């Protein structure tokens, strides 16, 4: 069962690396990786920690816990929505997060 | 009254948000103001009910208690619902009067924000708290990106990334709690094994995420950068809701789930004191009204958490009283700043001057609110600080000297910073007497003669200030409520019994 923690570790490491880059698109990729890591961790909390697969031969008392799956489903939906929003922000703001300031005539202090 | 009313605090604003999309703009704005007022009225009814019946529970979907997601109201939630409801009603009223509410979808987004806040204040389930915090944040991402200066787009990115990252950490924490304790229902967790280091670590991850959202030093950097970039109205709304919901959740989780775990009291105390100091003195480096105020928001977080770190009955009550005071006063100041920016087109210290004679009502209100922020009478801040100082003096550990000293030193910092704001904006020659006007970015602005802030823009700020003054003149009822709420946090047996149905 060590494949799950290793996957989480790889996702979180990659996500952290991307999050530290300049440029919103890379940051979005980083956030996506991190949230995948978090989702796998949630699954590990309920499925692999205590129980077996959902439709196994061992009866309902050992079959997988549906609650973490519901958690993950909710989290995926939320992350999807925010990712779409961030991609929109990345598009409308251009590359002002790396070096350029948009020229709109507004002053730089307010 | 039964617990069945609780879902309406979430459902009504959500339905109103949907309705506001399809209604004609004028009606949508009416719904925008009416819904938080309705919520406030409902919260006051809850407060009255809690005088006899301290805990109201609704098990959503009528599942078995302990399994169902509970919505729980006690004195603390009801107080928070009342104050956040009132403040958001005033803020959206300003948005209607000042023009922000004319933006497409502003009413819907603000109402969705209200629904998320009400849900987060009422839920008794950690994962549900995560969901409601997201419901609160998603409209905020849009609100921060649609009002304010051009910086809002870049700042919106910062705000989204910080909040999404902390939400992910929060989610991991919830997963860990579930993995260790097998439940995310706070009342069930109250009976969990508090000596299990894995459990405490899992809850600590949740609390870590919440301290970032609350803006506790050293995780405060995003707050004074993000908030001033949006418009004054939206900043006032966020200041009353976002950080305060996070602090409420810290209070709730720390008390219910961990039973006020004493192991990290020293750390909590250190963070609270650091937050007070950094926030109070941070204002000194700023040259724009709302940026200067945003540091005072950070300082306020420190004072509120100081009550939790002290942890006594008096400390918790004083912290909660301070929270109510801070929401009202900060809202008043930010709406006053929004009015100044709207009329004079700038919030920069170098560009405005001598507003005292020009805007007597606004100046009087701001002066009183600034005094309140520092903690002088006649204002609610005075009793907030007196309570915290008394609670700190009652500590029987050597830290109390440090706590008392830091409260005084931080207050002096806030006093100097706020005097500076006052001197730059309200004192000095009037704008017409300035030699060079309007030629460069740093010159005083060139206003048409006779420019005054219309009364409708000053009124919302005044309403919140009057509430704050009311807390000074008649502090008894509010203080009693704060003590009731603190009692609910200290003795969670009633809360746990009602929620789990035992």
Image: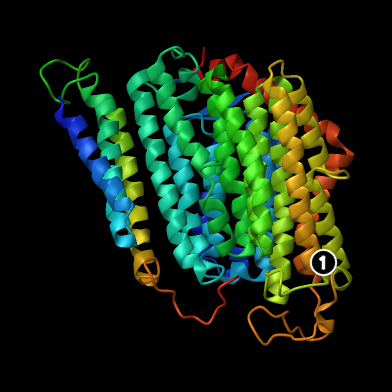
Q: In this view, does B452 lie above or below B47?
A: below
Residue B26 pos. (x, y %): 62, 69
Give the total number of marks visible in the rendering.
Answer: 1
Furthest-left residue in this view: A57
Residue A48 image point, x, y percent: 21, 24
Instruction: Name the residue located 45 percent from the left edge and 65 percent from the top edge.
Output: B154
Q: Quadrant of residue B399?
A: top right
Residue B428 on image: x %, y %: 84, 71
The subunit carrying tag 1 is B
The residue at which mark 1 appears reads as B426
In the shown orientation, is residue A35 left or right of residue B100? Answer: left
Apparent side of residue B59 relative to residue B405 in the rendered image (left or right): left
> Quadrant of the rendered structure where residue B83 is?
top right
Q: Which of A47 and B28 lies nearest the eye of the viewer?
A: A47
Q: Where the N terminus of chain B falls, by quadrant?
A: top right
Residue B166, image quadrant:
top left
Residue B184 shows in the view: no
Q: Using a 10 Å C-alpha cutoff, classify the residue at mark 1 as few (fewer than 14 neighbours), some (14 to 19) or many (20 or more).
A: many
> Which residue is at 60% across, 60% downward?
B234
Please tell me which residue is depicted at 19% across the width and 21% down the height of the picture.
A63
Q: Residue at x 74, y 32 (%)?
A: B405
In this image, B313 relative to A76: left or right? Answer: right
Looking at the image, which is closer to me, A2 or B136? A2
Picture coordinates of residue B219 (x, y %)?
50, 43
Per the image, label 1 sits on a secondary structure element best described as: helix
Q: Is residue B102 visible?
A: yes
Q: Which colour scheme is used?
A: rainbow
């Amino acid at each position: 069962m060590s494949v799950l923690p290793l996957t989480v570790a790889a996702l979180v490491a990659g996500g952290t690396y991307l999050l530290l880059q300049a440029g919103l698109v890379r940051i979005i990729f980083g956030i996506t990786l991190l949230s995948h890591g978090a989702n796998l961790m949630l699954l590990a909390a309920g499925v692999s920690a205590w129980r077996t697969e959902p439709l196994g031969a061992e009866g309902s008392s050992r079959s997988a816990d549906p609650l973490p799956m519901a958690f993950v489903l909710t989290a995926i939906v939320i992350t999807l929505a925010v990712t779409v929003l961030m991609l929109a922000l990345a598009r409308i703001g251009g590359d002002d997060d790396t070096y350029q300031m948009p020229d709109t005539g507004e002053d730089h202090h307010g | 009254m039964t617990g069945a009313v609780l879902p309406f605090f979430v459902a009504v604003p959500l339905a109103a948000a949907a309705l506001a999309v399809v209604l004609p703009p004028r009606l949508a704005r009416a719904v925008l103001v009416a819904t938080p007022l309705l919520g406030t009225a409902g919260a006051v009814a809850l407060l009255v009910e809690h005088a006899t019946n301290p805990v109201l529970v609704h098990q959503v979907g009528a599942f078995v208690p302990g399994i169902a997601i509970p919505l729980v109201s006690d004195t603390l939630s009801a107080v928070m619902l009342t104050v956040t409801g009132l403040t958001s009603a005033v803020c959206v009223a300003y948005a209607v009067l000042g023009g922000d509410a004319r933006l497409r979808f502003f009413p819907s987004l603000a109402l969705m924000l209200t629904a998320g806040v009400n849900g987060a204040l009422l839920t008794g389930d950690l994962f549900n708290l995560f969901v409601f915090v997201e419901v609160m944040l998603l409209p905020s991402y849009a609100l921060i990106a649609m009002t304010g200066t051009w910086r809002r787009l870049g700042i919106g990115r910062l705000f989204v990334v910080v909040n999404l990252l902390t939400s992910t950490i929060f989610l991991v924490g919830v997963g860990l709690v579930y993995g260790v304790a097998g439940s995310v229902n706070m009342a069930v967790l109250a009976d969990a094994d508090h000596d299990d280091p894995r459990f405490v670590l899992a809850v600590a991850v949740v609390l870590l995420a919440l301290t970032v959202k609350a803006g506790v030093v050293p995780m405060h950097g995003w707050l004074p950068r993000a908030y001033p970039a949006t418009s004054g109205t939206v900043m006032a709304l966020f200041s009353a809701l976002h950080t305060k919901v996070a602090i409420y959740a810290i209070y709730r989780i720390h008390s219910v789930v961990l039973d006020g775990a004493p192991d990290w009291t020293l750390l909590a105390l250190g963070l609270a004191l650091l937050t007070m100091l950094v926030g109070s003195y941070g204002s000194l480096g700023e040259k724009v009204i709302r940026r200067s105020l945003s540091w005072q928001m950070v300082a306020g977080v420190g004072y509120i958490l100081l009550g939790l770190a002290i942890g006594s009955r008096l400390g918790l009550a004083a912290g909660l009283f301070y929270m109510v005071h801070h929401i009202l006063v900060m809202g008043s100041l930010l709406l006053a700043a929004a009015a100044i920016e709207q009329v004079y087109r700038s919030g920069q210290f170098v560009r405005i001057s001598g507003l005292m004679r020009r805007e007597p009502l606004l100046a009087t209100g701001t002066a009183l609110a600034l005094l309140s922020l520092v903690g002088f009478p006649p204002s609610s801040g005075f009793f907030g600080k007196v309570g915290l100082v008394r609670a700190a003096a009652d500590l029987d550990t050597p830290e109390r000297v440090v706590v008392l000293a830091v409260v005084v030193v931080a207050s002096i910092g806030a006093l100097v910073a706020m005097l500076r704001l006052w001197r730059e904006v309200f004192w000095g020659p009037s704008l017409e007497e300035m030699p060079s006007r309007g030629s460069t970015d740093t010159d005083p602005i060139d206003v048409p003669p006779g420019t005054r802030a219309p009364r409708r823009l000053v009124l919302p700020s005044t309403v919140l200030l009057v509430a704050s003054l009311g807390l000074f003149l008649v502090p008894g009822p509010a203080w009693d409520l704060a003590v009731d709420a603190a009692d609910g946090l200290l003795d969670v047996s009633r809360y746990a019994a009602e929620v789990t149905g035992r």
